[in-house]
Image: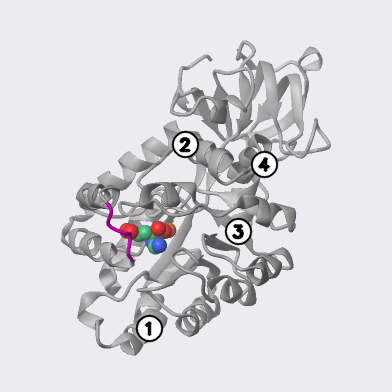
Amino acid sequence: MSLAITGIGSLVTNDPELGEGAIGELRDAAIVVVDGLVAWIGPGAQVPAADLAVDVEGATVIPGFVDSHTHLVFAGDRSGEFAARMAGQSYAAGGIASTVVATRAATDTDLRANVGSLVDELTRSGVTTMEIKSGYGLTVPDEQRSLEVAGGFTDETTFLGAHVLPSEYRDRPDEYVDLVCGDMLAACAPYARWIDVFCDRGAFDGEQARQILAAGQAAGLGARLHANQLQPGPGIQVAVECDAASADHCTFTTSADIDALANSNTVATLVPGAEFSTRAAYPNARDFLDAGVTVAIATDCNPGSSFTTSMAFCLAVAVRDMKMTPAEAIWSATAGGAKALRRDDVGSLRVGACADLVVLRAPSFIHLMYRPGVDLIESVWRAGELIYGRSAV
Ligand code: NIG
Ligand code: FE
């Protein structure tokens, strides 16, 4: 069955051959979807006949957001920690421990319900592909069940057993690293596509990160890394050395870090919500973009440093405070996120790509950043199916 989406006032394709600029923006456009894929894209006046048609009446259409970094599998509440930070306390990796206690105590049913409600929020925010990490279990069974729960919502699951040292291993870091690389990895690898390490102050050092990523890669997982969030450090260099798909956060960088990223296949994933909610200094995205680094934007949704599911919010902050242009930001949250997951079937709208798209009640995508805090999302479609919003068919 074919579906035509017509009356598109502005269409962001991310294919420069289809329209203007790097985001390939087309005016007065239409799309035809067949079997969940984009089958035709072009001027509205030339749209071929289809079984069904939806007229979006001049709205803007963008590719669905690809959120390449979330920590949705957790229980408990850390709003008190946020309030304390806003009163002057600083963010430290240690807050993770309180979520670990709550997550271990939660039932599978509760964990699944929590993830489900956050996935619903992400969907309403226009996210059509998402990565979900473990990392609040930190025992073999708790990490494994976190990934099983995550796998009920996405194929992009990440084993983050090396989030922090759990308290029972406080004085035995080498034993914990051996556990992560041994029994925990063996139990988790069947449920994960990726492996990640929090390489930073209060978490794991560069040597430990290298060892853990190498073990994960030997077990068939792709590498990604939490790097340079709390202070300058070895994270980005380790990520590049390991050919990680992405180095995430990149808050504190040197010019050598930027050069290393620019000469690699590693995407820099910026997470504006984390600097916002921890009141940290923002990285300057210009340093990355002007050096030729591929930049993604993700929510980093987690209960500690960035409890947001709103991509539009992250885009507004990236533009205002990280110095991205609106076009760069929209690319980074769609095509950039896809690159951070090493995917080319999502993140852009061209013939053969997944028909994952968001209809915005606005004359252009710029309104996503120009109207911060305003929900402009009219509908969200994945593989040509309406997954949120007003049914027009
Ligand atoms: O990406 N940096 C490490 N992990 C999360 C925060 C986790 C937490 O505070 O619960 C992050 O910011
Ligand atoms: Fe994170």
Residue segment shown in magenta: 88-92
Q: Viewer-proximal residue, 373 or 186?
A: 373
Residue marked by disc 2: 313
Indicate the amino acid at tag 3: Ala
Magenta region includes residue 137: no
Residue marked by disc 4: 328
**Residue positioned 30% across, 76% down in the render:** 165
Mark 3 → mark 4, Cα distance in angstroms: 13 Å
Q: Of helix, strand and loop, which one carries label 3? A: strand
Q: Based on the displayed image, in which of its 4 quarters is residue 159 positioned?
A: bottom left
**Label located before the other in sequence (4 or 2):** 2
Residue marked by disc 1: 177
**Label located before the other in sequence (2 or 3):** 3
**Label located before the other in sequence (1 or 4):** 1
**Residue positioned 28% across, 88% down in the render:** 172
Mark 4 → mark 2, Cα distance in angstroms: 15 Å
77 horizontally vs 233: left or right? left
Main SS of residues in magenta: loop
Frontmost of labels 1 and 4 is 4
Mark 1 → mark 4, Cα distance in angstroms: 38 Å
Frontmost of labels 1 and 2 is 2
Residue marked by disc 3: 268
2 and 3 marks in contact (CB < 8 Å): no
Q: Is residue 338 visible?
A: no
Q: Viewer-proximal residue, 310 or 276?
A: 276
**Residue positioned 68% across, 50% down in the render:** 344
1 and 2 marks in contact (CB < 8 Å): no
Mark 1 close to ligand 1, CB under 8 Å: no
- Coordinates of residue 334 in the picture (x, y in percent): 61, 42
What coloring was used for the rendering? Answer: one colour
Q: Of helix, strand and loop, which one carries label 4? A: helix
